[in-house]
Amino acid sequence: MRFDNYEPGDFYDELFVTKDKPRAEAIPLLERINSLPAGELQRRHQAAQIALMNMGVTFNVYSEGEGTERIFPFDIIPRIVSAEEWQFLEKGLKQRIFALNLFINDIYNEQKIIRDSVIPSELIESATGFLKPCIGLKPPGGIWCHITGTDLVRDRDGRWYVLEDNMRCPSGVSYVLENRRVMKSTFPKVFESMTIQPVEEYPSHLLETLLNLAPPQLYDPTVVVLTPGIYNSAYFEHSFLAQQMGVELVEGRDLVVADGYLQMRTTKGLKRVDAVYRRIDDDFIDPLAFRPDSLLGVPGLMEVYRAGRVGLANALGTGVADDKVIYAYVPAMIRYYLGEEPILSNVPTYLCWEPNQQAHVLANLDKLVVKAANESGGYGMLIGSSATPEQRQEFAEKIKASPRNYIAQPTLCLSRVPTIIEDQFEGCHVDLRPYILYGKEIYVNPGGLTRVALRRGSLVVNSSQGGGSKDTWVVCK
């Protein structure tokens, strides 16, 4: 397989400027691939899939009714980002996370942004992620969003946009780390010849972020990863990160509130827990404070947390910033809290709760993407250009019945990366999820998870909808 017949098409291609003209940072990789003997690239591609299978890199698909465990599809042609471009993205992500953290802290405390009429109070109060038990909460250091996965896309003109912010329990970073490990064995000579920024330091940065959460003046704080259990779609990641950090992986039944502290059951008795990386949604984490039917959480945890005797990442209540209606106000938050213009733009967004914007959306459903405010994974979404008239009518009725619950955006022409489809290279659409940690300072892991739409012509990159992943190389000159 060679790139001689590859057609970038009428899209921004991450590796090619035009047909036969690669981007400068991609030249060493493309030359190496073109030099491989016939059949060698396919052999390496298969070897990479087998390696990931042997490593147990899986996820569960609930929609099929069986909790089916699958290997996460992987393509060995990486996405390449120049160091200069990464510097721009890193600066924009730090600005965005800093402002979002100030926003979350504000709405659970003084609510200045509401009093100054920057964002309507009814939007906050109607957000499913806004948790009244968190009002007045003061997390350690005033930091709420310790771990964020922000989804970025690039349009046809090469411009980057923020598609959404994931602040509750963002997943996928384990694939970043495992993909890189496989790629180093797949293209060892390329890694020797190119300066590719490492991603392997993420677990140590994550552990440092979690230790920063623990109550002060503790000599040796105990950190745990709290998982819903083996049937969760991201259980591989929970166990992987716990192992990489050298901390315990626990379920709710392994923890108990005793003597005013969160404690872990061990063979030697109870042991105090000081910081928790929770991979359980807010509603399920404490049946005394939230859903009384939850069997996943720890009764009384909220009281210990509010007293400052344990740190949680992310803080409870951060899900309010995941709401796709609240997302539309992030540029205003940056201007309000920081007095700066946003470095990274939002995708232009129509708010269906506003009558004029709703009318525009209903009149242009064939040209727009409609999203439910609190759905993820590619669910609750209409891509108008590829939907049937019946599907568009169905969504029109949903919007009119519950306008607060929907936004609409233009259909972006997502950038593409050459991808192995059968025995040839095809351009497949991608997004990018960098991972940002907020501890003593904000750290952005170089690269992130490039998700790729493996179905021909598809714009949906989610693994649950047939997508896969690629390694992301931030390349220094």
Image (spheres, helix red, strand yellow):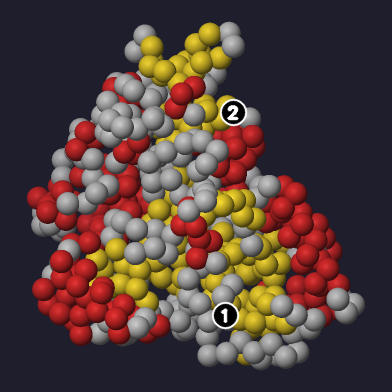
Q: x and y percent of residue 340 in the render?
A: 30, 61
Q: x and y percent of residue 326 in the render?
A: 25, 58
Mark 2 is surrounded, within 10 Å at the Cα level, by few (under 14), some (14 to 19) or many (20 or more) other residues, namely some
Say which of 260 and 114 sits in front.
260
Q: x and y percent of residue 376 in the render?
A: 39, 58
Q: Which mark is residue 456?
A: 1
Residue 271 seen in the current view = yes
Q: Which mark is residue 440?
A: none
Q: Nearer the viewer, mark 1 or mark 2?
A: 1
Kind of element beneath mark 2: loop
Residue at 63 percent of width and 69 percent of height: 79
Q: Amino acid at mark 2?
A: Val
The quadrant in which residue 201 appears is top right
Residue 3 vs residue 393: left or right?
Answer: right
Residue at 34 percent of width and 39 percent of height: 282
Residue corresponding to mark 2 = 247
